[in-house]
Image (cartoon, rainbow, N blue to C red):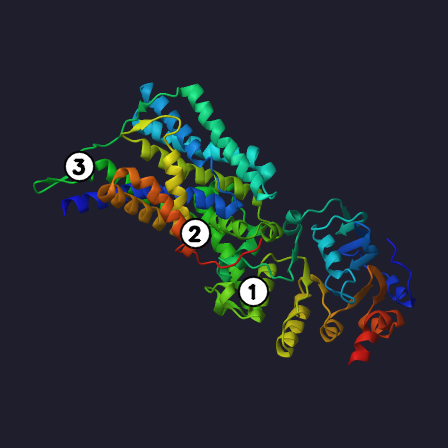
Amino acid sequence: MQQFVNITLNGLSQGAIYAAFALALVLIWRATRIINFAQGAMAMFTTYLALTLIESGQSYWVGFAAALVAGLVLGALVERIVMRPVEGGPELNAVIVTLGLFVAFQALAAILFGATFQSFPAPFGLRGFTVGEFTIAFTPFSVFVIGSVLVVMLALTALFRFTDLGLRMRASAFSQEVSRLLGVRVGRMLTLGWAFAAVVGSLAGLLIAGGNLVHPAYMDAVIVYGFVAAVLGGLESPGGAVAGGLITGLALSYVSGYLGSELVTLAALGILVAVLLVRPRGLFSRVAERRV
Amino acid sequence: MTLPETSETRLPSARSDPAPLFAADGVTVRFGGLVALDDVSLAAQPHEVHGVIGPNGAGKTTFFNVCCGFVRPDTGTLWWRGEPVPALRPAQLAGMGIARTLQGLGLFAGLTVAENVMVGADRFRRTGFASALFALPRAGADERRLRERAAAAMREVGVEDYAARHPGSLPYPVRKRVALARALAADPELLLLDEPASGLGADDMAELGELVRALTERMTVILVDHHMDLVMSVCDRITVLDFGRVVAEGSPAQVRDDPAVIDAYLGEEARHG
């Protein structure tokens, strides 16, 4: 029983991170029909920026905030400079470009920050809470992980649901041509969409890194799990991405806890294949058709 | 700007008109070897309903696409309030005060009816990017105004009861009204209606006719349609296209009796009827 609780709690906090990462993928997919394979590498890069600041004596929170702001700027720059020329062209072009970015960011990080493992601090304790005589696998840092992902998701939901800016972003995501006709500055909305997505991705990167080791490829596994989560949720729906993230986190945690950690990657692949075979539009996809 | 001298219908349009609100002058569009529009000219006066009719493939929709910047003409000029508009882009339309409905409606599937219409009112947003992003108080007042504007447009076409629904769940005639409300929310000076009557029953069409007539109080309407009843009863002036060329231009009565038009369009229908 204690093991089950521990595995579940661990799955939830991992799942929250996958959810954030999947959300970043979904935001970009909805707006531009591009799967951003460079999402993880961009998050890795901003996490390294945070680490550099922290190692130079700044507090964790300065590094944390700087990484999120850097994510915002990096996302906007990548969309405006690198992606804009290939948007609207053949889909494969954009995919290749994001893959190229992925490699480029990893290489650049290795050059700038070194390719060795470095430890990344956590702002809260990593010792589990004690319930009765048991120590459960739920740490103050896990609370922070789940809390910060929740805050970001609520903020994004509020932005999209209740503000005019969010309305324009959603309209642009559904039809760029019609939005343009109605006077929406679609280009700006796309830039902003990438910027927000990169912030959420950066958050995922920081949370994965907390209390762990970072190296230029440390986000690679998260890219895979985040992608599984996004597909599970249907790629179209932000809510689905969150649910997909939590389901993926829990499932992989159970596999790791009961079957063996060496099977986790295989299980992720299994989930991906199963979803694509049984419900290719994902568990939560509502919109059945959409031509742009 | 001269209209091609095709028939005697040219004479009435030489009346001492005020400056047209919108004009197309000598517009030619070629798609490869195909000439879709050949030297088409049209002038829409303030507060009139100007119809563009013609058999299928006559170039009506291509002409509309030129008017809203989707298609760049090979030659010819568009005029807006007496000024030439070189290289019109769709993104400029809303700011200029031109709204267009689309044949395919183009409603945003994932947005509610009210939200769809609010996007149409977007050009009245005053707050900049940053204050909208950080939800400053001015942005809140702005949004209330947009909401009110959208509500007024929905009331005008009678879809306010569907405000919270998604377009996909509504019958086609209602969706058409929503698309119209979205265009009206921009409070345009010129409204381009692309086949507003297609898919409507007789009752809906009669209501549409009244609505369009009422709109001339505030704006100029150019409409493309092939329902002759509607076009003849609603339009002040009509331009007839056939094979990409203007074959007639004038009041409904003049156009109806024009042999070129009967040849191109009405005759065919009359024979079948």
Chain letter belonging to callout 1: B
Provide the chain ID for the residue under circle 3: A
Tell which subunit mark 2 falls on: A
Q: Amino acid at mark 1?
A: Val
Give the mark toward the camera: 3 or 1: 3
- Residue B78, given in percent of the width and then of the height, sits at 77, 50
Q: Are marks 3 and 1 in contact (CB under 8 Å)?
A: no
Disc 2: CA contacts within 10 A as few (<14), some (14-19) or many (>=20): some
* Residue A103, image x, y percentages: 48, 29
Quarter of the rendering containing residue A279? bottom left
Task: Write the residue at 50% across / 61% down.
Answer: B114
The three-letter amino acid code for the residue at tag 2 is: Leu
Question: In percent of the image, x 48 and y 50: which residue is there?
Answer: A164
**Residue B178 numbered tag:** 1
Q: Which mark is residue A128?
A: 3
Q: Which element carries disc 1, helix, strand or loop?
A: helix
Residue B254: give x, y in percent of width and height.
Answer: 85, 72
The answer to whether residue B225 is above or below residue B108 is: below
- Kindly indicate whether the residue at mark 1 contacts the one at mark 2 (C-beta within 8 angstroms): no
Badge 2 element = helix
Q: Which residue is mark 2?
A: A276
The local secondary structure at tag 3 comes to: loop
Residue positioned 57% across, 43% down in the render = A91
First along the sequence among labels 2 and 3: 3
Whether residue B8 can be seen here: yes
